[in-house]
């Protein structure tokens, strides 16, 4: 009789446990770059960790190579109430056009002196404050973690050795006003060209140069049409991963905890991957005949950008100084 009671109790517990299990959740995750890039591999690390921690209770449906649209298209969809995308890896500055002023401070040229400087910020309480900015503004998404894809450098279809060599040239930039101001400060002419058209624009001479992290420069075959790169490191390619409120609210507390744990794991993974990948790619570029110019003293470059730096930090000068002081 005792054994029957014990067996019945065990069965009851099993039934309760089954009933308590949450419904499986699938989150569609957008990435504009291919999986084999630094950001793509970071996405995969996050996906695998979430699925491992949740025992498959959460599935990340990772859609890479821009199949769900550009960053601006993805964000427009999210902010207008669409539910095509649950999560996205975006550039840290992408939310500035939607009113996020703190995020813009991460795009200021010559702010981060080194990777270590950036990661001191990314792992700080101040970074959490930045990630929370969309929520504070009432936008229907929240930041999960920061990462990076290496310092951004100028590459050209003609030899460049100093900042003076950029003067009068046409350089492709994104729609970021800070980037446009920086290029103007350097004496060049900024022009907006869709990233998907940049290769042909460089090939045909519509642009004399552009800027990207080293790994992206190589993975997009830009050395074929612009075999000169100058390592000025004007900004660090800061990224962040965001999740919509709709998606976050689908998750129970335990599932949210798994997502946050995976976020920290992916951030740590990204820090190691980006540094090692950049060093490896740089050696490959040199071996392939790309002209690589080191910039030992960035003072002239930073001084040329003084106007755009001041204009874009004076409203949040104290906050910006906190970032600078983390070096």
Image: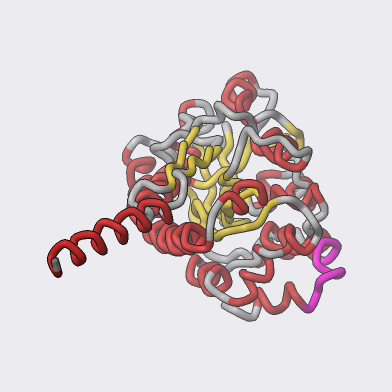
The answer to whether residue 312 is magenta is: yes
Q: Quadrant of the C terminus?
A: bottom right
Q: Is residue 85 rendered to the left or right of residue 168?
A: left
Q: Position of residue 146 (x, y in %)?
A: 55, 60
Which sits in the foreground, 41 or 167? 41
Q: Is residue 42 above or below residue 200?
A: below
Q: Position of residue 236 (x, y in %)?
A: 57, 57
Residue 173 visible (yes or no): no
Chain part drawn in magenta? 310-318
Q: Quadrant of the N terminus?
A: bottom left
Q: Is residue 289 above or below residue 108?
A: above
The answer to whether residue 277 is magenta is: no
Q: Which residue, as the protein is rendered here, is positioned at the far front?
A: 1
Q: Position of residue 317 (x, y in %)?
A: 81, 74
Q: Position of residue 30 (x, y in %)?
A: 55, 38
Q: Is residue 15 rendered to the left or right of residue 205?
A: left
Predominant secondary structure, magenta span: helix
Residue at point 81%, 71% (across, down):
316
């Amino acid at each position: 009789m005792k054994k029957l009671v014990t067996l019945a109790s065990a069965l009851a517990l099993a039934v309760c446990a089954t009933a308590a299990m949450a419904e499986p959740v699938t989150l569609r995750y957008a990435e504009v770059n291919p999986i084999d890039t630094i950001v793509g591999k970071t996405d995969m690390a996050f996906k695998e960790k979430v699925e491992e921690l949740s025992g498959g209770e959460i599935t990340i449906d990772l859609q890479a190579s821009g199949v769900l649209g550009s960053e601006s298209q993805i964000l427009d969809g999210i902010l207008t109430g669409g539910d095509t995308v649950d999560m996205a890896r975006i550039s840290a500055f992408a939310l500035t056009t939607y009113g996020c002023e703190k995020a813009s401070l991460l795009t200021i040229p010559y702010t981060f002196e080194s990777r270590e400087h950036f990661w001191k910020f990314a792992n700080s309480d101040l970074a959490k404050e930045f990630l929370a900015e969309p929520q504070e503004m009432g936008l229907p998404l929240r930041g999960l973690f920061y990462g990076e894809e290496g310092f951004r450098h100028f590459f050209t279809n003609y030899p460049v050795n100093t900042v003076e060599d950029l003067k009068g040239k046409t350089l492709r930039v994104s729609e970021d006003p800070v980037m446009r101001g920086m290029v103007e400060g350097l004496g060049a002419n900024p022009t907006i060209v869709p990233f998907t058209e940049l290769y042909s624009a460089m090939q045909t001479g519509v642009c004399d140069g552009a800027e990207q992290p080293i790994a992206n420069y190589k993975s997009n075959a830009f050395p074929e049409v612009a075999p000169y790169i100058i390592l000025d490191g004007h900004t660090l390619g800061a990224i962040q991963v965001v999740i919509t409120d709709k998606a976050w609210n689908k998750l129970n507390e335990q599932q949210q905890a798994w997502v946050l744990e995976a976020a920290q794991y992916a951030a740590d993974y990204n820090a190691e991957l980006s540094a090692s990948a950049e060093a490896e790619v740089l050696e490959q570029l040199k071996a392939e005949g790309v002209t690589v110019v080191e910039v030992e003293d960035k003072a002239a470059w930073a001084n040329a950008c003084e106007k755009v730096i001041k204009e874009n930090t004076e409203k949040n000068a104290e906050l910006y100084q906190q970032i600078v002081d983390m070096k």
